[in-house]
Image: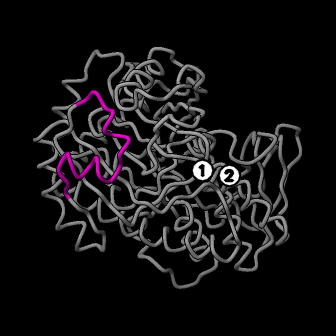
Amino acid sequence: MKVAILGAGVVGISSAWYLAQAGHEVTVIDRQPAVAQETSFANGGQISVSHAEPWAGPQVPGQLLSWFGREASPLLWRWRMDLDQWRWGLGFLAQCTARRARENTEALVRLGLYSRSLLQTLRREQSLDYDQLERGILRIYTNERELARIAAQAEVYASLGCERRVTTAAECVAIEPALRESSIPLTGGLFTPGDESGDACKFTLQLAQRCAVKGVTFRFGETVAALQAEANGIAGVRLGSGEVLRADVYVAALGSYTPLLLKPLGLRIPVYPAKGYSLSIPLEPGDHAPEVSLTDDEYKIVFSRLGNVLRAAGTAEFTGYDTALNEGRCAAVARRVRQLFPRLSQLDRAEPWTGLRPATPANVPLIGRSRYSNFYLNTGHGTLGWTLACGSGQLLADLLSGRETGVDPAPYRV
């Protein structure tokens, strides 16, 4: 079949690869001049399967109250006259129960394990090199209660196939010696040796090249203006130029912008942009930067070594589709970096970035067919787009092709 994929981020390109592998004729459309130029451009770099827990949980309402009004808080909610924002917020609070958190965790981990296995196979078979490191992820804590809470989840993750080791502060330093320089006292950590890190943008660029070899067509610099709907399906995609592109099947992988495309069709999906920030810090010899990927639990910041760059990324700002850099929030990330790694000589030369992560209230993505028979979605991955990309692409390709899937598709149904 002829398949048109709308969006060329890591999720869209992964979808293109697995659809082409399944024998479909694929065209990818994106408004940018190349792949991975928006949300996939400078994210945190973690393949964090063993840390794939939803934002929403029983402890979160209390945390939100403690963060309220703090400009530099890990989660900043800017009140807007926006019904979609309010609807999303109420849906998020509804997910903050122990039962929902467990169900959502299971859905994320199952898809994450499947995705990581596919990524490793793809990397090996296609000789991909994207500054990947297979050294695990160390989550560090400064709060005893939070460490105890996360340690109590060990059985849940173990039952799903994830190895999680609770570590002392001394063991954290042994795993990542750069933490010895930290001015912040640690209470302990959680080490997941099976997790990885790597540059999502580099991965997407290389996979797009492999897609082109397999015959995938790319239409860059093309804005998707609207979908043309018929009684039971999509008849075409109207581009900004006025051209109508036609295919047998259409896939929306536009991240946070997917809901805007669907609204004129009367389709609503619970996806809202969560604005994240990152700093890409050039490294020099003697900087004593971390080699193991880290997550700072208190500030919700992740650190990944990507070649000669340290990527520090995190926080969530709910402010609609505003993509302007908030210098105050960038400065807050930089301050935390300086506290943890004071010997970084080039922090003042860090390159700031912001992107809109497409979040669902449950943090579980939407993958599958919409109410239109030839229109599919692959969106809503939140902070886990890089972690779940390959699994999401393969699941979509299997569903679209009518084949047996490698993971139960029910939790991700549109």
- Which stretch appears magenta? 166-184
Q: Residues within 10 Å of mark 2 (few under 14, many from 20)?
A: many
Label annotation for residue 302? none
Say which element carries label 1: loop
Task: Give the main secondary structure of the magenta stretch.
Answer: helix
The residue shown at (39%, 20%) is 78
Tell me, yes or no, if residue 380 can be seen here.
yes
Q: Name the disc covering residue 199, or none.
A: 1
Residue 261 falls in which quadrant of the image?
A: top right
Name the spot of residue 329 as percent of width and height, x first.
44, 20
The image shows residue 229 at horizontal and vertical percentages of: 70, 53
Q: Looking at this view, is 163 or 32 the one in front?
A: 163
User: The N terminus appears in which quarter of the rendering?
Assistant: bottom right
Marks 1/2 in contact by CB < 8 Å: the verdict is yes
Residue at 71 percent across and 77 percent down: it is 21
Q: Callout 2, which amino acid? A: Lys
**Residue holding disc 2:** 202
Is residue 170 a member of the stretch shown in magenta? yes
